[in-house]
Amino acid sequence: MKPLIAALAASILALAGSQASAQEFKASYKITMTQPASHPYGVGAQRFADLLKERTNGRITATLYPDSQLAKGEREMIEALQQGTIDIYVGSTGPVANFSPSMGILDIPFLFRDAEHVDKVLDGPVGQRLLDDLDAHKLKGLAFWENGFRHLTNSRAAGKTPDEVKGIKLRTMENRVHMTAFKAAGLNPTPMAFAEVYSALQTRVIDGEENPVAVIYSGKFYEVQKYLTLTNHVYSPAPMIISLARWQRVPKADQDVILATAREVAKFQRKVNRDEEAGKIKEMQEKGFVVVREVDQAAWQKAMAPAFEEFAKQFGKDNIEAIRNTK
């Protein structure tokens, strides 16, 4: 009987110790992103920071560093996460796939049908597996936020079909999936850090770029481009990732709070992004952007089809079909 009592006492002491450590734990996190604070990334990150402070009675705080303040590009941000010099990152999956290759499956063109399909995949087993894969790369995935469906902008032609913009120099993220798809479609994909894109468009170093509406709007690309072509060619999630080194220092009770808050805010952030999109398109059109709505998506899909053989080899045909068939 005595060993059992001793074991129970030890368990109670351990629990009390963990509770005390959680109550004493304090942290201040830096959240980095390429976009401005007004972008849905920033809106979501501020809500995350406010809720985290409230739910931990001020023990855990987070400060936003938008507009690439802490690092020039997303690759540099993710490397800093691995090193523990930046705490939390919100950004596209494109650059993340250079560190955790399985994440690249989400960047396959025309993979998602609509927003409802997106949410079922990202909030389900597939999304969780992809977040869990980050652990092996000194990163901890918290939740999938949203960048949105990507569209084409350029200064040359309407781009209703790939043939209309064949050969244009198109800025892409440093992402093998995107580059392979656009090369198959006859364009000239050119990787470039986001901070350099506006000036490169302005000086015609590149002819165009591709991004979701919120990024095109906040980047003011309507000032240096003529056409916005609503291709919806790729859906870009925005994983919220914390440095694994920082995460492992957090008591379990606070880990639960951080994780739950990140997932709760994910739903809020996606809604903000989707609710604002139509208004941003209208405003950019009023500023002179030629908005091309009648896009021949079948032609775009056909042009990119040769790339799918490589995607099937890289990610597995069954895995791709599992996403496509999610209902």
Image: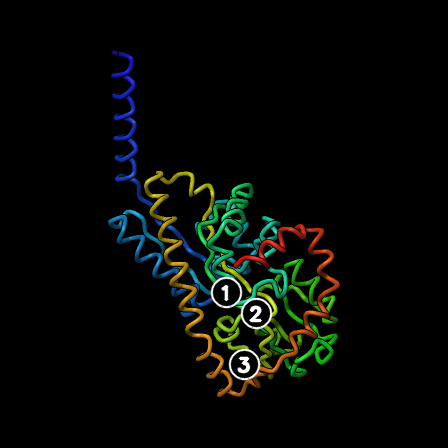
Residue closer to the observer: 38 or 319: 319
Disc 3 marks which residue?
Answer: 222
In this view, the residue farthest toward the top is 2
Q: CA distance from mark 1 to mark 2?
A: 8 Å
Q: Report the side of 180 relative to 260 (left or right).
A: right
Disc 1 marks which residue?
Answer: 147
* Image-quadrant location for residue 267: bottom left
Q: Residues within 10 Å of mark 3 (few under 14, many from 20)?
A: many
Which residue is painted at 26% across and 26% down in the image?
12
Disc 2 marks which residue?
Answer: 150
Query: With respect to residue 93, does 214 lie above or below?
Result: below
* Image-quadrant location for residue 229: bottom right
Marks 1/2 in contact by CB < 8 Å: the verdict is yes
Q: Residues within 10 Å of mark 1 (few under 14, many from 20)?
A: many
Residue 81 seen from this side: no
Which residue is painted at 35% across and 49% down in the image?
28
Q: Report the side of 75 relative to 69 (left or right).
A: right
Residue closer to the observer: 44 or 24: 44
Q: CA distance from mark 3 to mark 1?
A: 18 Å
SS state under label 1: strand
Looking at the rendered structure, the number of numbered marks drawn on it comes to 3
Which residue is painted at 59% across and 59% down in the image?
324
Across and down, in percent, residue 272 comes to: 40, 68
Q: Residues within 10 Å of mark 2 (few under 14, many from 20)?
A: many
**Mark 3 or 1: the one toward you:** 1
Instruction: Tell me which amino acid carries mark 3.
Output: Tyr
Across and down, in percent, residue 18 comes to: 30, 33
Query: With respect to residue 222, does 258 lie above or below?
Result: above
SS state under label 2: strand
Across and down, in percent, residue 222 comes to: 54, 81
* Image-quadrant location for residue 31: bottom left
